[in-house]
Image (cartoon, helix red, strand yellow):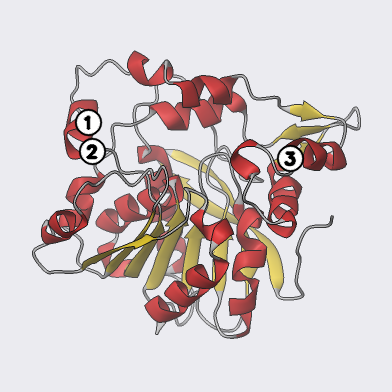
Amino acid sequence: MTSTLTDTLRPRMIKIHTSGEAGEMAALDMGDAQRPVDVIFVHANGFNAQTYVSILAPLAKDLRILLIDQRGHGRSTLSANPQGRRSWGDMRDDLAALLDVLGQDPGAKPVVLAGHSMGGTVSLLASRLRPERVKSLVMFDPVIMPWGVSLMANMPWADHKVWKAAPIAQGAIRRKSVFEDRASVMAAYKGRGAFKTWPDEILADYVAGGFKDRADGKVELACAPAWEASNFTAMANDPWTAAARAICPVQVFRAEIASTCRIGDAAKFCRRNRKGLIRVTEVPGTTHFLPMERPNLVREALTEAVA
C-alpha cells in the first residue's frame, strides 16, 4: 500500500518566530499556488499533515489548503521538550505565528482554520489570538474537557500528575517507536486498535508522514512517545472561553461514540456564544476518528466554510 501524493502537493518549510524561538513549521501546500490560502488544516495528537492528504485532495481543484505539522510532529523542526508542559499554548502560539506569516502573502485573506481532535482545539485557541485572520472554524471531534474539569486544570495549583497517570498517556509512553520499515508498521497497525476503522489509503498516508528514516535503515516515530504523552497531559487549556468569545462562525462535528468533545448539552454550549456563532452536529455512528470514517463530510464542511 502506497501513500497518496498528488501533482498539486508541495512540501514546504515555513519559518516562524514564537515564544522567543525561531524555527520551521513543515507543511504540505495543496491546490493552486497562485491563489491565497483558503484553509489551514491541523492534525490530531501523534498524527501529521500527510495523514489527511487523501481526505482533502479532492478539494485541491478548487481550494488552496495548507496542512501543517505541529511542533513535535512530522517534519517540523520547532523544539519539543515535554518536561513541565501544562497546556497547548506553545502550539497555539505556533499557529498564530503562522497566520502572521501567511498574512504577509500577496492577496492574503482570512482563512478557514480546521482541525481534528487536538488540532481542532489548537485552532480554536489560536483564533482568539488572531481573530482578524480567521474567517471561520471547523472542528472535527475537538478535545474539550467538561467545563468543571477544564476549570480545575487551569488552576495554578492543579496537580497534573493525575493526567500523567491516565491510561491514554501511559499507553503513549509505552508505544513502540522503532520498526524495521514502513511495511512492518502497516502490518502492525492495519485493522487494529485506534486504526481499526481507517481505510488503507489513509493509514498509508499516516505511516508515510509519521515515521522518519534512521541511519541503521529502520524507521522511527516522528512524534516521540514522550511528546505525544505530554499532549495528553497538558490540559490547562481554555476552549470554553475561546468558544464563548469567538467572533467568527464555529462548526463543531462531534463523534457519537467515545467522543473527546465533552461539552454536555450541545444547545447549552452553543448559547455560551452570545453572537450565536456556534453550531454543533453529532455525526451518527462515528468514533473519534470521524475524518477517516466520513471524509465526504469533511470535504463538504470545508467547502461550505470557504464559500
Which one is closest to the eye, mark 3 or mark 2? Answer: 2
Eyeballing the image, is 84 above or below 57?
A: above
Name the residue that disc number 1 marks. Answer: 149
Name the residue that disc number 3 marks. Answer: 211
Dot 3 alpha-carbon crowd within 10 angstroms: few under 14, some 14 to 19, many 20 or more: many
Write down the quadrant of residue 77 in the picture: top right
Earlier in the chain: of badge 1 and badge 3, it is 1
The disc placed on residue 146 is 2
Where in the figure is residue 11, as x and y percent of width and height? 69, 61
Residue type highlighted by circle 1: Val
The disc placed on residue 226 is none
Residue type highlighted by circle 2: Pro
Quarter containing the N terminus: bottom right
Where in the figure is residue 87, as x and y percent of width and height? 34, 33
Which one is closest to the eye, mark 1 or mark 3? Answer: 1
Q: Which residue appears at 21% of the width and 46% of the height?
A: 264
Q: Which residue appears at 61% of the width and 45% of the height?
A: 76
* Mark 1 and mark 2 residues within 8 Å of each other at the beta carbon: yes
Write down the quadrant of residue 234 in the picture: top left
Which one is nearer the viewer's eye here, 172 or 155?
172
Where in the figure is residue 99, as x and y percent of width and height? 41, 61
Write down the quadrant of residue 192 in the picture: top right
Residue type highlighted by circle 3: Phe
Which one is nearer the viewer's eye here, 175 or 8?
175
